[in-house]
Amino acid sequence: MSVFTSREANKLFGGNEGDQLLSYVMRQGFGNKEYFVEGNWISRPEGKIRGSRYIFPSDFSKIQNIANIWNWIKEKSIQTPTYTDKVLQQLSDSLLMSQRLCFFSPWGPRYNNNSPIIKEYDSEIMTLRELKTILQTFREKGYTPDLLLMPADAYGTEINGLSETFVDDYFKSLEEWTHKELGETKVRVVRWSHVRDEQRELYDTLCQRVDQAFDEYINGRIYRNSIEVAKVFNPNQAKESARKYCIERIVEGEIISRVYNPINIF
């Protein structure tokens, strides 16, 4: 049996998320929570509570692994992780219920190279190897990671005017290198245009919703920055192009979350 006080849980996870996560684990039926009232530990919160603790029926190695990987995520993240409650729950469910853990990484087209074919010395290979290192870290902590790699083909062809043949050849090359570099990991390479076609009804509904309430969904600064980028590819229709891009990104994120429920890597 393993026992954690709320203070010990927060210390283990490096913040209040420890108490939050262990409360979630209890609700999933993996242990019990007790409350210290008038010198005794009781199972229901009554009277003046002086403290609380979590009790697991077996050793806490999996909880320790969840804490270790969470602290590693915080350490390696350039920005503060978003949707922390959701990510922690996914980390917990995967390890405690022996489920595969799905990661998601979108991948944009190639813009600054005249060749669509990836070579071993190209930056894409470095990125794939960085992905491999990340996934290996999770594997070492007891997880079974999957990767959903999504080539953002429609952004290149429909919004930024790249050649369909060039974009297609580039992502075929990317898929070959992905399976070569990440051989130990189950990888699905699914282009955004394919996801969109499979979810066409949902896509159309979400596009209409975001378009009608554009200012509520899109931060003004982000939209202005998108306009500046769009001036490079569509100088005569920069605002329209930027708006389309912003709507597409919001809708993409919502569909990916609903359909695959992954953890975003990049």
Image: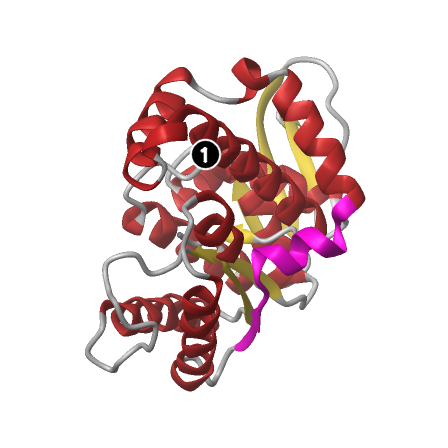
Q: Residue furthest right?
A: 201
The N terminus sits in image quarter: bottom right
Q: Position of residue 191 (x, y in %)?
A: 57, 62
213 horizontally vs 157: left or right: right
Residue 41 in sight from this viewpoint? no
Q: Position of residue 165 (x, y in %)?
A: 46, 69
- Kindly identify the residue that appears in the image at 59 percent across and 65 percent down: 190
Which stretch is magenta?
186-200
Instruction: Give the answer, above or below, for where 96 lies relative to 43.
Output: below
Which residue is under mark 1? 7
At mark 1, the secondary structure is: helix
Q: Position of residue 167 (x, y in %)?
A: 44, 64
**Front-most of residues 265 and 35:** 265
Amino acid, disc 1 = Arg
10 horizontally vs 25: left or right: left
**Front-most of residues 104 and 195:** 195
- Kindly identify the residue that appears in the image at 47 percent across and 43 percent down: 159
Residue 152 in sight from this viewpoint? yes
- Kindly identify the residue that appears in the image at 37 percent across and 40 percent down: 14
- Kindly identify the residue that appears in the image at 65 percent across and 51 percent down: 261
Q: Residue furthest left?
A: 121
